[in-house]
Image (tube, rainbow, N blue to C red):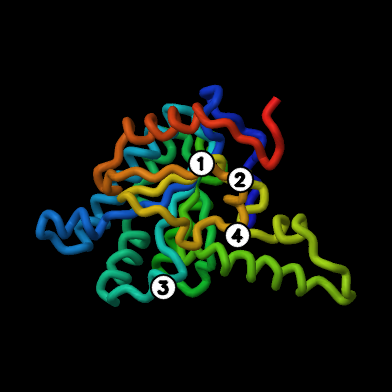
Amino acid sequence: MAADTGSEKQSAHAGYPKHIGIIMDGNGRWATKRSLPRTAGHYEGLKAAKRVTSEAVRLGIPYITYYAFSTENWKRPEQEVSYLMGLIATKLLNEYDYYRQNDLRILVRGNIAVLPQAAREALLATEESTRNHGGTTAIIAVNYGGQDEIVRSVNKWLENRSDHTPITSKDICDNLDLPSVPPPDLIIRSANEKRLSNFLLWQSAYAELAFYDTLWPDWGAKDLQTACEDFATRVRRYGGIPT
């Protein structure tokens, strides 16, 4: 899904990331440790995302992307998938006052055409209702997979081609879901898992990676602060030598 997001936005804190991607892991384990159903972990994970988003707004982080539901998550039990889709359908628009108070813009990436109608409509309505907000942009990746996004990008490019011009990196970038959003500077994964799991594969080519033990439902402002401070100590070379 393409949108004009104003990619020139800068982080308010020098040295902090301009765009953070978050793989929210550990909801199920959080619930299991408390003898609760996995759905309770997902609900608490939603509250954690709100706490982290509030801190991103306070820190002046221009973009934050949440990996909410992957193309592989359809393999989960039907009851769990239905609950997650229900959360999207019922909770997003109810937070409009929060979006307005924080000047928060919501965007969506992923193939949402196959989602249940209520979830799809809630995502699109939330995008539309926040389209004029100019603060932090929070991006929700739903039915998203990095490989799937690249395939869809190439197919979009092919639709408008009648010759045999070779495809370029720019062609792919221009046809990704949100081409005007800059690539992530930092990708965070909670719950001590150390893999990307098909998240922002194209965009993460030079992202810094950070893995933390804390289960996602326990995340809050201090955790995001720690991640940003860790990022600020890193030297990014982009294949070259720092000067």
Disc number lying in front (2 or 3): 2
Residue bearing the label numbered 1:
186
Specify which label sits upstream in the sequence, 3 or 4.
Answer: 4
Residue bearing the label numbered 2:
206
Badge 4 element = loop
Specify which label sits upstream in the sequence, 4 or 1.
Answer: 4
Q: CA distance from mark 2 to mark 3?
A: 34 Å
Badge 2 element = loop
Residue that protrudes farthest toward the left in the picture: 35
Q: CA distance from mark 3 to mark 1?
A: 31 Å
Specify which label sits upstream in the sequence, 1 or 2.
Answer: 1
Give the residue type at disc 1: Leu
Give the residue type at disc 2: Tyr
Q: Quadrant of the N terminus?
A: bottom right
**Rendering coords of residue 89 (x, y %):** 36, 62
Specify which label sits upstream in the sequence, 2 or 4.
Answer: 4
Q: Nearer the viewer, residue 180 or 220?
A: 220
Q: CA distance from mark 3 to mark 4?
A: 17 Å
